């Protein structure tokens, strides 16, 4: 059984791999902020809601990654709730099997039919402030995904999705998934200055002060950018990726290799955007040079 924890008078969260927010609207109805990363978390959430006599009125998906949307179908069928997600992300929520197209740049090398290939998609409407009750706030959190949003409940609890990761995640994964590195750093600077009574990242425990963790995330991203820059001169992508992986002591299976190599390309793109490196073709090899 995952932990079901109270953050404020009306706000709870289920502590699991991808944390789930619950806001009590009164009269036996709740809003979910994300809804589970696998069947175990969904069933534990369902049990916690049933114990309190709560039914789901509305689900907010912060973004369209599979580990945040698994429970949509269950609560749609059970409670007839509405599902909302930010623009673009709503399309991915509905068509969840498209996720491997950008996590793996197609089918993984070993054609592994894993969690991400299962059809969890459900229809999602576009998330706007008007669809939420008074007192909720939405905050764009670009960087990890195409158009991820954070949500603040009326009693001051921020749900920050994957914009902030635990320090252990950086240590364990080496290169956790980010779509736009520079946008993520800007987002983290904004998060560091947020006010609220509690902050709930998707992949870390809730905290009362998010600033130390946000700043630690900024350091981790900037340190990795600096590492890529250090090993870039006159090397191909494969050579750079191998050098960075060795420095971060990363170990791979086929699945992690495919996902992480895409994130590595995003670090190189960040350096290209900075004007710190250039890239040119030598035959069939893309070679990166330090400016």
Image (cartoon, rainbow, N blue to C red):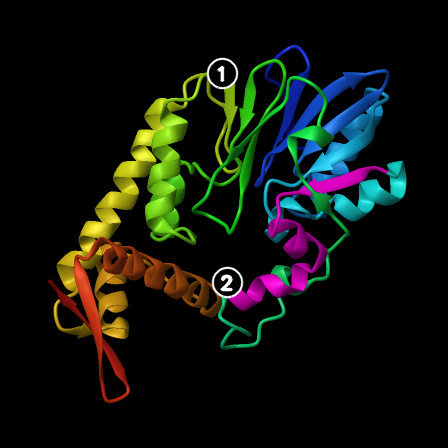
Magenta residues span 81-102
Which residue matches tag 1? 196
Looking at the image, which is closer to me, 140 or 16? 140
Q: Residue at x 38, y 29 (%)?
A: 190
Circle 1 or circle 2, nearest the eye: 1
Badge 1: few (under 14), some or many (20 or more) residues near its Cα, within 10 Å? Answer: some
Picture quarter containing residue 221? Answer: top left
Q: Which residue is mark 2?
A: 103
Q: Earlier in the sequence, mark 1 or mark 2?
A: 2
Residue 150 x/y as whole percent: 54, 33
**Residue 132 vertical placement versus 244 (above, below):** above
User: Residue sitting at 46 percent across and 21 percent down?
Assistant: 207
Residue 253 in the figure: left or right of residue 98: left
Q: Which residue sits at x=51%, y=64%?
A: 102
Tag 2's secondary structure?
helix
Q: Which mark is residue 116?
A: none
Q: Quadrant of the N terminus?
A: top right
């Amino acid at each position: 059984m995952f932990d079901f924890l109270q953050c404020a008078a009306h706000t709870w969260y289920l502590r699991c791999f991808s944390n789930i927010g619950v806001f009590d609207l009164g009269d036996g109805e709740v809003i979910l902020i994300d809804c589970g990363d696998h069947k175990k978390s969904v069933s534990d959430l369902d049990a916690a809601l049933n114990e309190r006599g709560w039914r789901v009125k509305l689900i907010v998906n912060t973004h369209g990654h599979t580990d945040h949307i698994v429970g949509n179908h269950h609560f749609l069928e059970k409670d007839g709730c509405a599902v909302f997600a930010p623009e673009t992300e709503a399309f991915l929520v509905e068509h969840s099997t498209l996720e491997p197209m950008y996590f793996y740049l197609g089918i993984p090398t070993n054609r592994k039919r894993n969690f991400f290939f299962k059809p969890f998609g459900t229809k999602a409407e576009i998330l706007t402030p008007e669809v939420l009750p008074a007192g909720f706030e939405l905050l764009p959190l670009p960087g990890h995904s195409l158009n991820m949003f954070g949500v603040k409940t009326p009693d001051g609890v921020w749900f920050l999705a994957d914009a902030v990761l635990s320090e252990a995640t950086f240590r364990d994964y080496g290169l956790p998934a980010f779509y736009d590195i520079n946008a993520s750093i800007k987002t983290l600077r904004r998060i560091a200055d947020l006010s609220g009574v509690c902050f709930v990242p998707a992949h870390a425990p809730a905290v009362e002060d998010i600033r130390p963790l946000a700043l630690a995330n900024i350091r981790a991203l900037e340190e990795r950018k600096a590492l890529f820059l250090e090993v870039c001169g006159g090397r191909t992508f494969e050579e750079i990726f191998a050098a960075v992986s060795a420095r971060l002591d990363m170990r791979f299976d086929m699945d992690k290799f495919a996902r992480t190599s895409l994130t590595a390309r995003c670090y190189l793109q960040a350096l290209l955007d900075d004007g710190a490196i250039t890239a040119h073709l030598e035959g069939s090899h893309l070679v990166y040079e330090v400016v």
